Image (cartoon, grey):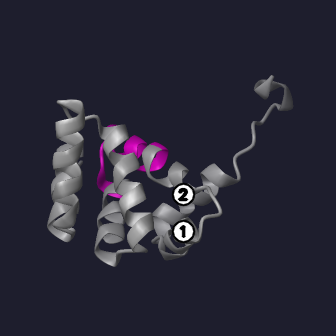
Amino acid sequence: MTSIHDLIQDLIAASPELDAVRREHLADNDELLPHVLFGDVTRWLVERGPVPEVLAVLEHHIGAGDAAVQNVIAVSFLENLFGDDPGERAVQAALGPCLKAEFDAMWNWTPDDPEAAT
């Protein structure tokens, strides 16, 4: 199982530009807040368009990561791609099979009980 630390290190190895995103995050927050950092990573990726090396790291870790890794990728990466922005759409289209399956499951989720939402 991989950890948040492993995920961040692999992302930086795949795209060294992300180290600046991590350093800025640490300067702003005085500590690592994974969900906040992954909001920044998502915005970075949307601005640049799909970066295959970064998406490959996320694809690997969604399957190999521990519960915290899976949660941060789903909640703070994939959920931030739900908009209609052309950059978001481009990243959505480039998701690997595991990321795409998770994205689709989240996008198409409905409660089993219609009363559950009230």
Q: Do we see residue 87 in this rendering?
A: yes
Q: Real-space Cα distance between discs 2 and 1?
A: 7 Å
Q: Quadrant of residue 112?
A: top right
Residue ID for mark 2: 81
Residue ID for mark 1: 92
Q: Position of residue 51 (x, y in %)?
A: 35, 75
The foreground one among 76 and 7 is 76
Which numbered disc, 2 or 1, marks the residue that appears first in the sequence? 2
> Which residues are the magenta region?
63-75
Q: Using residue 82 as the reference point, say whether residue 98 is left or right of it.
A: left
Instruction: Look at the image and say whether residue 70 sits in the magenta stretch.
Output: yes
Q: Using residue 3 as the reference point, say whether residue 46 is left or right of it.
A: right
In the displayed structure, 87 sits above or below 109; it is below
Name the residue rendered at 42%, 57% in the picture.
Answer: 43
The foreground one among 74 and 32 is 32
In the displayed structure, 112 sits above or below 6; it is above
